[in-house]
Amino acid sequence: MQKWLPVQGYECYYEVSNTGSVRRKSTHVKNTLGVTKFIKGKVMIPRDNGMGYLRVKLTSANKSRRIMLHRIIAEAFIPNPNGFKCVNHKDGNKLNNSIDNLEWCTQSYNVLHGWKSNGRMLTERQKYNSYYNLLYGQYKQVIGKRIREYNRA
């Protein structure tokens, strides 16, 4: 059964389902001449962004943005307690936007996972950069804890 939740930042206008559909809500809108017109709700058709990811065009207050579908789904249905910024497709298939296939992660993990899931080999420089970013992220967490502990004392 589909469960619909509002899209973050567009709560009054759009909803996303746990199956990966986005729909526009029916609403009354005033145009620039002040005339109110009724806009019927509909399920939006996602488009390919040219790199294999699906995106939808969302409009609010006469401003449009194209947002990745997997990101909308993750923001609505998957908790992000660590505050990660990237959404990863676990199976490497960019078109599989089911909740079970998405996870929040760091950018370095996302890059490494993308290379591994597509069967490509990392160059030595890419391995070094990913490893460095991973270590630097852990270092920042430790330093941040020490600074907070120092400030409390």
Image (cartoon, helix red, strand yellow):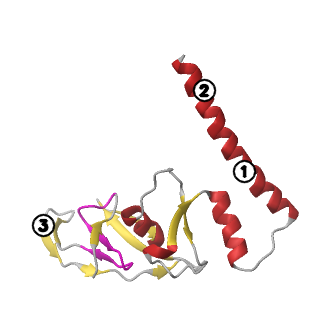
The residue singled out by tag 2 in the image is 147
Q: Which callout, 1 or 3, points to the residue nearer the camera?
A: 1
**Residue range of the region highlighted in magenta in the rendering:** 9-24
* Residue 56 within the segment the image draws in magenta: no
Q: Residues within 10 Å of mark 2 (few under 14, many from 20)?
A: few
The residue singled out by tag 1 in the image is 133
Residue shown at 77% from the left, 77% from the top? 120
Q: Residues within 10 Å of mark 1 (few under 14, many from 20)?
A: some
| Among the two numbered marks 1 and 3 on one chain, the one whose residue lies closer to the N terminus | 3
Residue shown at 46% from the left, 81% from the top? 47
Distance from disc 3 to disc 2, alpha carbons, whole Å, reads 57 Å
Q: Position of residue 84 (x, y in %)?
A: 53, 54
Q: Residue furthest top?
A: 153
- Three-letter amino acid code at disc 3? Val
Distance from disc 1 to disc 2, alpha carbons, whole Å, reads 21 Å
Whether residue 143 is situated above or below residue 22 in the rendered picture: above
Q: Position of residue 139 (x, y in %)?
A: 69, 40
